[in-house]
Image: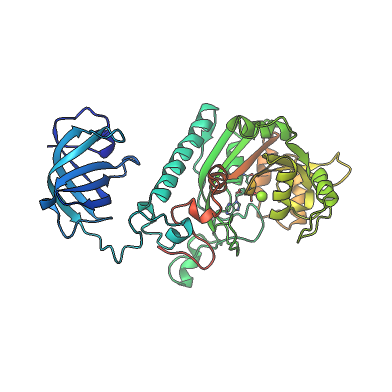
Amino acid sequence: PTKLRVSEAFLDAQVGEKVRIQGWVRSFRPQKQNLFLHVNDGSSLKSLQVIAPAAMNDPLLGFGCAVEVRGILKKSPHSKQPVELEAEQIWVIGECNPVDFPFKIKERHSLEYIRQFLHLRCRTNAFSSLLRIRSEATAAVHSYFKNNGFLLVHTPTITSNDCEGAGELFQVEVGQGISWFWSFFSVPVYLTVSGQLHLEVMSGAFPRVYTFGPTFRAENSQSRRHLAEFFMVEAEISFTESIEDLTKVWKIGSTGFTNCTKQKNLITYTEAIDILKRSSETFTFPTDWGCDLMTEHEKFLVKHCGNIPVFVTDYPHDLKPFYARDNQDHPKHTAAAVDLLVPGVGELSGGSLREERLDLLRSRLGECGLEDTYSWYLDLRRFGSVPHGGFGLGFERYLQCILGVDNIKDVIPFPRFSHSCLL
Ligand code: 4AD
Ligand code: MG
């Protein structure tokens, strides 16, 4: 018989034919005369109803086990399902002990509960749906950039630079503490915290580049929005002269999202501080000009602006990494940097214009003691430098935002965070 995927069985074309399907039992109802199963093979969310004579029951059959069923595909008399499979043979391919299996038939388990079983949670409807959306969103990111003239650059995972300078690097060692091998690269190397500097290299030859891959931060944070390994979408655009030019790329990519209301959604950091200071809310962290915006501040600002995505621009220069462009003409010392804050999550994305002026960049690197480390980066400004800028967007935070998922660990297949690297 023809082997069908369950999603193909629903197409109706094989009705009346003998077919075979393979999948996992999602529901199991033995009755006096007949046995009813629902079988799902992951080809879609749908399960195919299988009807078999009661005599075909097998003690190994049950919720969670893997089966092959052969039989005739029939039009179903029930309005809920167009087709059903009248079984002639059922084989248990892989049994599943219902006592030990952590998921129970007909029970709605919480995301927190299923997270305890990272190796099994893809078998639940909730998590498998999430994975499907993650996969679709990944494809959508690539298609957006492709349709808008961006070149995909595979930036490296192992690097010798610390783009953000925040001291959250994972250093890479070869072997298990074998010190002689440490010299493999002759310099200390790290897992990347951002592909930005490599994108900036490419933006010396390509006007629009992007990357989308794993990034690593040794943040000792058990928060609901931090991971030690997360995926970042990063874009870099040459010949960009203003923050508004830059935010257009975000806005086009999310029409109906950032443009969802007519309310103002671009405020400066200085305005944000004024809003926080004027509010009657009590914050744990200080709200003085020069202090970093913390999650509590970001969430407040989003609410204050009408629960819409908000761009905060022109942060204090000292809060931003060495590459951020100095806003020299501003009365306060700010940088042309921007964060996108969104409901439920806070900071979803951060970007800036990059300091393209050789003298200013050199003195900034000098202040940070990094002039030698970044001589190649200074070269980018010596040879055909152009105004440019870009941003990075945390893909898991994006998924949290569109799905309303509270904990970031529930939108990535295998979360890594401090004191946890299972599997
Ligand atoms: O704001 P960040 O640190 O910016 C950069 O790394 C820039 N170099 C990006 C660029 O301009 N090309 O990180 C960008 C985004 C954050 O806004 C946040 O959404 C996400 O990455 N992010 C994290 N997501 C999950 N877990 C973490 N530990 C994260 N750290 C940052
Ligand atoms: Mg940031």
The front one of 366 and 73 is: 73
Q: Which percent across, then down, holds residue 189?
A: 54, 59
Q: Which percent across, then down, holds residue 222?
A: 58, 63
Q: Does residue 322 appear anywhere in the picture?
A: no
Q: Is residue 140 above or below residue 50?
A: above
Q: Is residue 325 above or below residue 99?
A: above
The front one of 271 and 316 is: 271
Q: Which percent across, then down, holds residue 223?
A: 60, 60
Q: Residue at x 54, y 27 (%)?
A: 149
The front one of 138 and 384 is: 138
Residue 316 horizontal side relative to residue 125, left or right: right
Q: Residue at x 81, y 49 (%)?
A: 273
> Which image quadrant: the N terminus?
top left
The single residue placed furthest to the right in the displayed view is: 331
Residue 378 horizontal side relative to residue 105, left or right: right
Q: Residue at x 79, y 54 (%)?
A: 281
> Which image quadrant: the C terminus?
bottom left
The front one of 264 and 206 is: 264
Q: Quadrant of residue 107?
A: bottom left
